[in-house]
Amino acid sequence: MYGHPRTGVVLVKLALAAGRGSELAETRALLAVDARTASAAFDRLGDTVLVYLHVDGVILDFVGQGRVAAVGIGTGAGRTLTIDPYTPFAAPVSGEAERGVPGTRRLLELPDARFDAILTQVREAERAGAAEAGTSFASVPTEATYVAIRDQVLRSFRHQCAFTGAADVPGARLSIVAIRPRADGGPLHVANYLPMVPGLERPWRSGHFSVGADYRILGDLYRLAPELQDSMVALFRMLLPDHAADYPNPDLLAWHRANVFGRS
């Protein structure tokens, strides 16, 4: 954390959501924000912030950084926030750590350590050659892209969790979870995502369970929450879409088995 040069108040660093109505270009970003976010950003004029995409609390990726240049009046109660200069990340950084934070639709307050860790991941990805693979990332995927992927994945799986059969309903929304995370080279494609009840997302990412080549559920299910164990044991095999063309990518599932499953 740091003291702001104009107020002297100790502040956390900011990350701002690029939601509907926002525009991300190669050197400048225009963010459609609410009044609360506009006020917080106005206090940070000239400061460096991160920019992320966020849809229904399901997928959150940090996609760029830049300086807060101006805050203006938008349409209705909205505001327009200018990030200039803006630098898109060559490859996105997963916001899994922030997934459960309340009120992340437009604004995140990040401790210095987390802010710096995100930028470190960006630099490491660039050194690993991810920059070439994701050259046009910031100018192609938008919030609409994520919404479309979520909708298609849910339709393919009949709006059910792939592992428990639980329905996606108001108040109990399913998470759309990457088989191979974007930060590890996973594609932004429907074949790389599975619908899960929120309680399964962290165990999946931690490697407590996986899926075999025959789509059987692998792992020690008794490490999961008791309310999830019975439903998963009863299924034994993950639910699959009606059409084989909509099945999750077997190569990505193999990657999860080889690189994530059983590591913790």
Image (spheres, grey):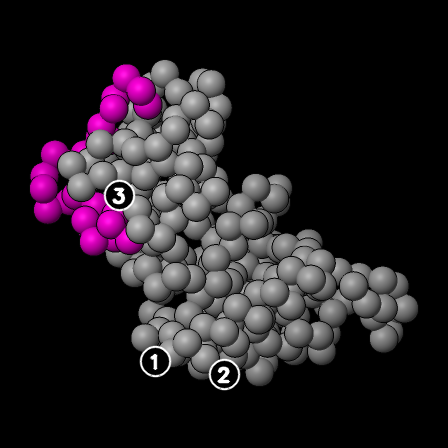
| Number of other residues with Cα within 10 Å of mark 2, as a class: few under 14, some 14 to 19, many 20 or more | few
Identified at 30% across, 46% down, the residue is 257
Q: Nearer the viewer, residue 51 or 205?
A: 205
Residue under label 3: 153
> Which residue position holds label 2?
27
Secondary structure of residue under mark 1: helix
- Crowd class of label 3 (few under 14; some 14 to 19; many from 20; radius 10 Å): many
For the residue carrying disc 1, how many other residues have a C-alpha within 10 Å: few (<14), some (14-19), or many (20+)? few
Query: On the picture, is 98 further left or further right than 226?
Result: right
Residue 201, given in percent of the width and then of the height, sits at: 43, 39
Q: Amino acid at mark 2?
A: Thr
Q: Amino acid at mark 3?
A: Val
- The picture places residue 163, in percent across and down from the top left corner, at 31, 29
Disc assigned to residue 132: 1
Q: Does the image show residue 38?
A: no
Residue 29 placement, left or right of 221: right
Which quarter of the figure has residue 77? bottom right
- Residue at image coords 25%, 47%: 253
Taking the image as drawn, is residue 203 in sight? yes
As drawn, which residue projects farthest toward the right?
8
Task: Find residue 94 and report its horizontal and vertical position in percent.
Answer: 48, 57
- Are the residues flagged by discs 3 and 1 in contact, CB closer than 8 Å? no
* Stretch of the chain drawn in magenta: 232-255
Gap in angstroms between the C-alphas marked 3 and 2: 33 Å
